[in-house]
Amino acid sequence: MKITGINIVRKTCRFEPKYQNEARSVGPLDIWEEYALAGPGKNSRSGPEEAPGTQTGNFIEITTDGGFTGQYGIIESRAELLTIMDGLAVHLIGRDPMDNRMIWDILSRFDRHSRSGLMMMAVSAVDIALWDLKGKMLGLPVYKILGGGRKRIRAYISALGFSVEKEAAKKRALAIKAMGAKAQKWFFRYGPADGAEGIRRNLDLAFALRETLGDDYELMFDCWMGWTVSYALKVFPELEKVHPVWVEEVLRPQMADGYRHLKAETGIPLAAGEHFYTRMEVNAYLKDHLFAVMQSDPVWCGGITEALRIADLCELYGTVLIPHGHALLPAMQVVASMPPDTCPYCEYLLSFMDRKNAFFKINRLGSDGYLTLNDEPGLGEGIDEARLLSSEVIHSFAF
């Protein structure tokens, strides 16, 4: 069986959001006042234009001469990715899709810049679609092909997009806890540009959540690369009293020396990794034991193939791997193939997954706070045809 083509398909379905975008996280651009003062949307990219009551997303499809099709979505809606896909297609078409590890190696070498960034994001999308294709060809779910046997995985809920005003945050935190979630992560809104008042408001949020959820509840925080070393050192002595399970992406990913400084000065466990690419880059941080939690995302780090290698590295170093939750199903396949002491959780971005789940038949999150894998071949990602309004090929790469 041979790969015959790659399609980018734009799908639109009916969708009414459960949650409103009330706030955003601090971010790396917030060091500049014009960005620090901006509300939700200033630091984000827009996707395809959507009519009210609908959700639109792009999917990658890999076709074969045997009638099987591998699919993964939603993928980033960026013109640059389509240009990269065009470059990848020549290395894919005509190959046996069962050779997906060999294909990964070829794709990771096809350009001098393919080791990271948008290049690796394109490779990741292709890799995930190939695993879906392989599962469908074999009639098995991906996690079973990987040797996994965990049918249920603990989720931690990320509260990105919800208000961080104290009373609103406390109310939302209790609602998330009532969903059965045993852990949740909140996003600090303020950074160095906000001065002492921003520090106070960040700490007010942290203490309010701890008081509301109780001393034993697992509580995490995310800075989304928006802090500096000196700022973090001002916040951490008070934040330590909240006993966070971890604080995430305090600095930009390339600031290894800054992370070494922070690790030496605080007892708060540090987490990062969603913006690291391939096992080579991850290994540079693991060998120095800078992070208690690595968060490589299969959608960005090199697909399921590379995320598995990173998971094995994490097990070797004794570091926990909890994949970033940009896309749920690829992360679930990886976590289900690893022991729970290495991969104890999957991240579930509550508001974000509400939009992504609009296309699919199954809501993975149960009332007990666990995510459930099914035995459908491939990723188990069945499109809900009854809700689909349109599906059109917007780019096709074939030779």
Image: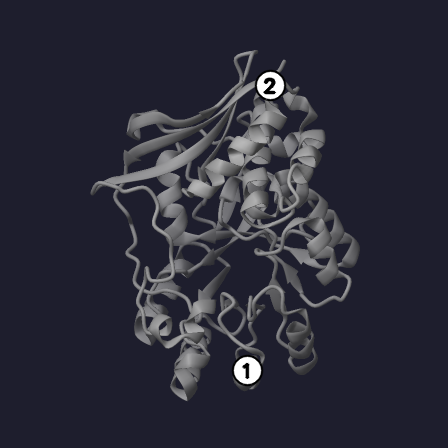
Residue 158 in view, yes or no: yes
Between residues 261 and 5, which one lies in front from this camera angle?
A: 5
Residue sitting nearer the eye, 174 or 200: 200
Q: Report the residue that reaches farthest toward the bottom.
A: 196
Tell which tag, 2 or 1, sits nearer the viewer.
Answer: 2
Q: Where does the N terminus fall, quadrant-wise?
A: top right
Where is residue 184? Give x, y as percent: 48, 62
Please name the residue shown 44% across and 53% down the image. Answer: 349
Please state, as top left, top right, bottom left or bottom right, where the C terminus lies in the image. Answer: top right
Estimate the x, y position of residue 262 in percent, counting from the top left.
Answer: 64, 78
Label 2 crowd bin: few (<14), some (14–19), many (20+), radius 10 Å: some
- 392 left or right, relative to 199: left
Q: Name the residue under label 1.
A: 241
Locate residue 299: give its quadrant.
Answer: top right
Q: Where is residue 264 in the image (x, y as percent from the top left)?
A: 70, 80
Is 195 above or below relative to 133? below
